[in-house]
Amino acid sequence: MAAGRAAWGIVVLALLLPPLTIWPTPRTAWVPWWGDGAQGPVGDVRSPLPGEPAGEGVRVLAARGGDLVHGRDTQGRLAAGPVAAKRLAGELVGPHWLTGERVGPWRIAGEPVRTPRLGGEVVAPGRTAGEGAGAKRAAADPVPVKKIDRRLAGYLAGRPGPVTAMVKDLTTGRLYRYHRGERLITASTAKVQILMALLLDTPWRKLSKAARRDADLMIRYSDNHAADRLWLRIGGAQGFTKAGRRYGLRHTQGVPGDCLDLYCWGITRTSAEDQVRLMGALVSGRSPLPAADRDKVLSLMGEVVRGQDWGISAAACEGDRVALKNGWLKRVSTKRWAVVSAGLIRGGGHDYAVAVLTEGSAEVGQGIATVEGVTTRIMKSFRACTKI
């Protein structure tokens, strides 16, 4: 009996443990994935590293370690991580070992998906067959990058100042970036990160009445003095930057000191990619922010006062829900306006994280028009719909 139990133990361990060798074969290998790309020997098998051309990637055949988010096996059943020996469609988070096969375009659970270029994510649609061919096509269709590039180049010709933008369909992983290397100022869009930093330390239900009031004023009315008070409460630039790191931001660092009659949160430089990441953290189960607090931030962003609800909302379709925060700031040095809009457009079974940043407009209205024009010209390649 003891020998029999030992034999069964060996079988179980063999099934649970990864292969003894991790060196690649010509077609498959164990590929280590640490959130920012592959580490170690990968040979002919590659994970989707940042900047890798579309169509390159691996087919995920199995995973050990980390967590599987929104994953489904090939039968469409919800899978829970860590998971092994299943073909997965989902987002894998944290340190993993992936068994992969290089097959060109991602084709997981029978649905081809454009290889994402945003490092740190393995994205697949995770849909069930019952959602219909239209939904599958929406997940599979590549984003026409060159077409959007030409469209924006024509629109922005003659318009002043730098522009950077990003749209990501958080449901499918499809994304588009414009001038991704630009780092422009946040203006009042920084107020969302201030609130999200505050809530990392103190959940909404435990905030004082005064802090809740300041949060409401800061987001819905864009009140600068309320933002100043909360800026101090989160620890200023240091607390702001620290919170950003927890949300996965890479290009956004708080500026210490005073700027005229306010603190310097408004001249924080950021990237469109970081703003999209921050918006994604408001709808992701992986976010360090609990669901109740994420919902509260979205609620405030969905109720900005009339006159401040321009921006990415220009691309909303009938029935969509929009949560946004806009920023507008006249630069002392140039006398020109920085105009920014970032948020989420949610509808049709999709969540779109959108960020558009501009500088150099002679008038704030010109900057608003640029933000809205860029947003609509990108979003028309993600979906067709009846406008509000």
Image: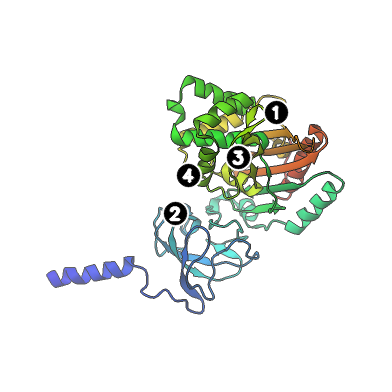
Can the viewer see residue 320 in this picture?
Answer: no
The answer to whether the residues at label 1 and label 3 have Cβ atoms under 8 Å apart is: no
- Residue 184 location, x and y as percent? 69, 44
Quick one: label 4 or label 3, which is nearer the N terminus?
A: 3
Q: Is residue 283 left or right of residue 179?
A: left
Amino acid, disc 1: Gln
Q: Label 1 neighbourhood size at 10 Å, few (<14), some (14-19), many (20+)?
A: some
Looking at this rendering, what residue extends furthest in the left direction?
1
Between label 2 and label 1, give the one nearer the viewer. Answer: 1
Reading the image, the residue beneath label 4 is 285
Reading the image, the residue beneath label 3 is 255
For residue 55, which quarter of the picture? bottom right
Residue toward you, 257 or 97: 257
**Colouring rule applied to residues:** rainbow
- Residue 388 location, x and y as percent? 73, 33
Amino acid, disc 3: Val
Quick one: label 1 or label 4, which is nearer the N terminus?
A: 4
CA gap, disc 3 and disc 2: 36 Å
CA gap, disc 2 and disc 4: 11 Å
Q: Which element is circle 2 on?
A: strand
Q: Is residue 71 above or below residue 25?
A: above
Q: Is residue 64 left or right of residue 121?
A: left
CA gap, disc 2 and disc 1: 38 Å
Between label 3 and label 2, give the one nearer the viewer. Answer: 3
CA gap, disc 1 and disc 4: 29 Å
Residue under the point 73% across and 57% down: 144
Amino acid, disc 2: Leu
Reading the image, the residue beneath label 2 is 68
Q: Which element is circle 3 on?
A: loop
Quick one: label 2 or label 1, which is nearer the N terminus?
A: 2
The answer to whether the residues at label 2 and label 4 have Cβ atoms under 8 Å apart is: no
